[in-house]
């Protein structure tokens, strides 16, 4: 079974460059399909050492199931982060409690299921950690992400050679602020949640790679992955409608970051946009759980 709970030693050799791919919110079956067909090829062709995917929309657009968790690992994903939809499919709770390669946001209630970080030992040796934070502007109430990451980093740094942070937030200001707050303390801060990629990838002054949002892995002929007609109907009438998953213009959006596991600094960040001409006949399958009805806040 993939992703068992094991204790890693930090990498024996830490004088190594790592290429880490971070992909944005993976939406429903179309997102899973392109990842299943393209990810392993991309990993091999580009010598990717670790893949981090935000999976909060992987099951029918909201949440993730244990079956989909296992599938994503088979497709080449090594670490899964989540967001405001972390617990939308309750059956994932057992996985969150038992596996160390999937995490919910760190700054939720301390009584929430699971952990706020994930850990993966690369084939080369160095151990990659990803901390998952959630924003507080235009989002549900959460604890302070700054205090939460300050508290976590000393112990996470002991377990890992390099730490990435998924800042799952709506407001650009909140993500940019977190990038600067963690500059020089982690390898990369990347934003998720808006499903819209930003063009501000950069290496911050103290060596942390940064982007405000890595975008969406899913159908782009859509409103954030959902069918245009149903979202428009809802916005225009103020009435609840099912937001079905869209089907066309499926892309993987993400970033590839090169980091030095010994200096813990990023050397390069590049946006990835990988598209294929698929047409999804069906947006749902048995792993999705029940389709979500009523306005769903994406
Ligand atoms: Fe989200
Ligand atoms: Fe999302």
Image: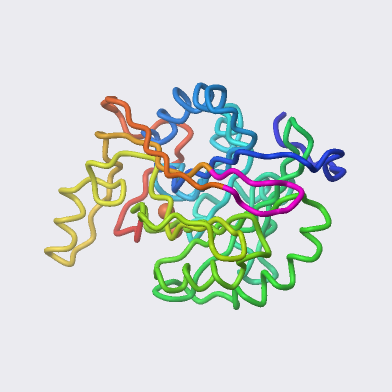
Q: Main SS type for the magenta part? A: strand
Residue sitting at 39 percent across and 50 percent down?
A: 215
Magenta stretch: residue 182 in it?
Answer: no
In the figure, 245 relative to 163: above or below? above
Q: Nearer the viewer, residue 124 or 239?
A: 124
Q: Quadrant of residue 38?
A: top left
Q: Is residue 141 left or right of residue 3?
A: left
In the figure, 22 relative to 115: above or below? above
In the figure, 96 relative to 248: above or below? below
Residue sitting at 52 percent across and 44 percent down?
A: 22
Q: Is residue 120 left or right of residue 146?
A: right
User: What is the x, y in percent for residue 282?
Assistant: 30, 29
Quadrant (top left/top right/bottom left/bottom right) for the C terminus: bottom left
In the figure, 158 relative to 274: above or below? below
Circle count: 0
Q: Is residue 1 left or right of residue 51?
A: right
User: What is the x, y in percent for residue 61?
Assistant: 39, 46
Residue sitting at 31 percent across and 34 percent down?
A: 250
Q: Nearer the viewer, residue 295 or 25?
A: 25
Q: Nearer the viewer, residue 244 or 139?
A: 139
User: What is the x, y in percent for residue 12?
Assistant: 87, 39
Quadrant where ligand 1 appears: bottom left
Quadrant (top left/top right/bottom left/bottom right) for the N terminus: top right
User: What is the x, y in percent for residue 188?
Assistant: 59, 55
Q: Which residues are magenta?
A: 257-267
């Amino acid at each position: 079974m993939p992703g068992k709970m094991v204790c890693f030693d930090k990498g024996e050799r830490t004088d190594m460059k790592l290429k880490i791919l971070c992909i944005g919110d993976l939406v429903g079956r179309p997102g899973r399909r392109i990842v299943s067909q393209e990810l392993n090829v991309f990993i091999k062709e580009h010598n990717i050492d670790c893949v981090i995917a935000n999976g909060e929309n992987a099951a029918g657009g909201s949440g993730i199931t244990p079956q989909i968790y296992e599938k994503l690992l088979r497709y080449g994903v090594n670490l899964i982060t989540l967001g405001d939809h972390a617990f939308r499919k309750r059956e994932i709770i057992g996985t969150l409690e038992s596996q160390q390669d999937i995490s919910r946001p760190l700054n939720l209630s301390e009584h929430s299921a699971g952990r706020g970080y994930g850990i993966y030992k690369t084939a080369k040796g160095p151990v990659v950690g990803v901390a998952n934070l959630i924003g507080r502007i235009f989002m549900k109430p959460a604890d302070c992400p700054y205090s939460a990451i300050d508290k976590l980093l000393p112990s996470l740094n002991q377990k890992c050679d390099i730490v990435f942070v998924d800042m799952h937030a709506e407001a650009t200001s909140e993500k940019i602020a977190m990038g600067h707050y963690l500059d020089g303390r982690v390898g990369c801060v990347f934003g998720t949640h808006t499903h819209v990629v930003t063009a501000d990838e950069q290496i911050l002054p103290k060596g942390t790679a940064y982007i405000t949002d890595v975008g969406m892995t899913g159908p782009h002929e859509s409103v954030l992955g959902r069918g245009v007609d149903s979202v428009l109907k809802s916005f225009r009438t103020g009435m609840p409608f099912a937001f079905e998953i869209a089907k066309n213009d499926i892309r993987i959006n993400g970033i590839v970051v090169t980091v030095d596991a010994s200096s813990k600094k990023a050397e390069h960040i590049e946006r990835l946009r990988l598209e294929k001409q698929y047409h999804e006949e069906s947006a749902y399958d048995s792993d999705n759980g029940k389709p979500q009805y009523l306005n769903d806040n994406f």
